[in-house]
Image: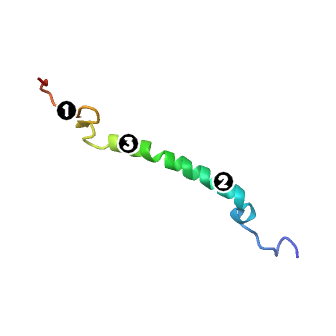
Amino acid sequence: MNTLTTPQKSWPLRQPIAFLILAAIVWLGLYQTLLPGSEALADSAPGANAVDKDQGPSSTSPSK
């Protein structure tokens, strides 16, 4: 049998351990971006400055 008639295996089937390691690294990287990405998306929304996370609702009158 020559190389023209042999079936070609995909990369995950040829090197499953390397594929699993790379897939785990990519998954962890994407997982780590969920919280910062969601906060950036929420901060970019219209009206995002109406409520400050630390101070509560913003007001122009001084508190007594």
The residue identified by callout 2 is 21
Residue 3 appears at what percent x and percent y? Answer: 84, 70
1 or 3: tag closer to the N-terminus:
3
| Foreground disc of the pair 2, 1 | 2
Judged from this view, the residue extending furthest toward the right is: 1
The amino acid pointed to by label 2 is Ile
- Residues at marks 2 and 1, CA–CA distance in whole angstroms: 47 Å
Graded by Cα atoms within 10 Å as few (under 14), some (14 to 19) or many (20 or more), the crowding at tag 1 reads few
Q: Secondary structure at mark 1?
A: loop
Residue 53 appears at what percent x and percent y? Answer: 29, 36
Q: Is residue 36 depicted above or below 2 in this figure?
A: above
The picture quadrant where one finds residue 12 is bottom right
The residue identified by callout 3 is 39
Q: Secondary structure at mark 3?
A: helix
Residue 23 appears at what percent x and percent y? Answer: 62, 55
2 or 1: tag closer to the N-terminus:
2
Way the structure is coloured: rainbow
